Image: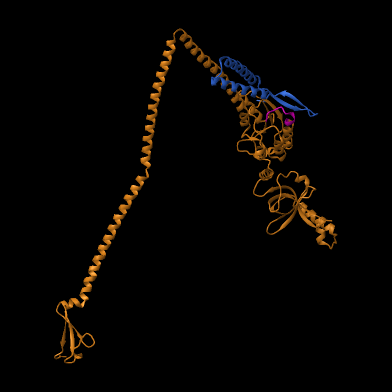
Amino acid sequence: MALMDIFSEKTILTVSRLTALIRGVLEDNFDQVWVEGEISNLSLPSSGHIYFTLKDSGAQVRCVMFKSAAKNLKFRLSDGMGLIVRGRISVYDQRGEYQIICEYLEPAGIGALQLAFIQLKERLAREGLFDEAHKRPMPRFPKRVGVVTSPTGAAIHDILNVLKRRFASLEVLLYPVRVQGDGAAREIAAAIADMNRLAEVDVLIVGRGGGSLEDLWAFNEEIVARAVRRSRIPIISAVGHETDWTICDFAADLRAPTPSAAAELVSASAEELRGQVESLIHRLRLGIESYLAGRESRLDLLRRALHDPTILMGHLAQRVDDLTERLALGLENSLTRRREQFHRLEQSFSFKNPIHAITDQRQRLQRLESDGNRLIQSKMEGLRLAFGEQAARLEVLSPLSTLARGYAIALKSTDGTVVTDAARLAEGELLRLTFHRGTAACRVESRDT
Amino acid sequence: MATEKFETALKKLEDIVKRLEGGSLSLEDSLKAFEEGVKHAAFCSRKLDEAERRVEVLLKRKDGTFDREPFEPEE
């Protein structure tokens, strides 16, 4: 039945038929979608399929990733994680739900491999796999070096070049493995285990030359990290360039920035060893020669002394003189040295002497003090002048100065009030006159108003 | 392991040189020490020289045992 028929006629559909039709529409039109959202309701049953809901603030959609696709997933999912999903839309008939069948997942905002690296590193670190306490010491004098890498890669080439250049007398046992692509990690881990079973080498270099994060990925796999940690033979990890850090680097006993650097690390001790033996041989020869020379000259002296004892006496006397002179010279030198030392100290002392600092501060204080005094004095002077002016003005208002010019103040004897109006006086009334100097009692003879 | 013997010889050589340099040995002991030192020194040098730079590649057989072949890197 064509889809159009459903709408044009009154066709009764079964639920299954309707669902099948809807599924057809969705699967035909959404066979490849990319969707970004946040994980919720994550479920990881033992079947290996992954179920979750992808949601944003407005909607949600069910998602499933079947085991066949899920086994390629490097990082771990968790609720709340931002995710980008690639897949197709299908319908889950039994529930009448549409869902995304996911083929590929990547974390939003960060690469999938980067996230996988961070997650594995954290997990293994928590487990203590990288603890310093686990690190085996490097052998001081390695004789045989195992190398786990590609036989055609840059790493083995660089390692052999360095050993050749340094004339390092080391035996190299190469265990050829693939260092990238599917199955590489398993091969590397197995090689490390085999090398431990063979137990022929003193130290093991595991690594490869530089490449992209994807190329180096085998060295970020858990299986390699665990094989490295399980190894009884000390392992130097040498993956990529100086800036590339892998899980293998963290798990190894020593991390070399490059394969060449790893070769230098194992051959340095051989070179050092050769130098050590050579210097010992030199010292051995020198030791016996100077010993014999010393004995010989002493013997010579004694032999001659047998013939003529004064030779020995003279020799001893000379030695005494020599020692005396050296003693005097030594004393003087020592004194001179001490004197110079003292002068040096004295100079540095007077330079740093706190007395100077105190004197400086004291002078500064005195300066401040006299400045202050001057300031106060001039301020006082100003105030004094101002006071004088004010006082002069006050003088003008004072009745005393008026009195000095010959005026007098008349006060009633009865109540002491000032008389300013003759009309208020009665004849015969007593007044008290106050002059510039002194007072007088007066009687009113007459008044004139 | 040969490495062990080498290290023992090296240690003995070191001790002998120190004793000889100390100068408190009798003539006879000095000569004896020297002679012994020379022997250890020769052993150490030989050990260092005889380890030629051999490079082998391991080839795993089906039964899990290994073959070895000289390894020639491609230039």
In percent of the image, x 18 and y 88: which residue is there?
A430
Q: Is residue A239 visible?
A: no
Left or right of residue A50: residue B49: left
Q: Is residue A169 above or below residue A129?
A: above
Q: Toward the viewer: B57 or A447?
A: A447
Residue A25 spot, x, y in % from top left: 78, 54
Q: Residue B21's quadrant in the figure? A: top right
Q: Residue A246's quadrant in the figure? A: top right
Q: Colour of chain A?
A: orange
Residue A306 spot, x, y in % from top left: 47, 9
Quadrant containing the C terminus of chain A in the rendered view: bottom left
In the rendered image, the residue lying farthest to the top is A307
Q: Toward the viewer: A269 or A340?
A: A340
Q: Which chain is blue?
A: B
User: What colour scheme does the image use?
Assistant: by chain
Q: Toward the viewer: A162 or A36?
A: A162
Residue B29 spot, x, y in % from top left: 58, 16
Q: Is residue A92 visible?
A: yes
Residue numbers of the magenta segment: A195-203
Quadrant containing the N terminus of chain A in the rendered view: bottom right
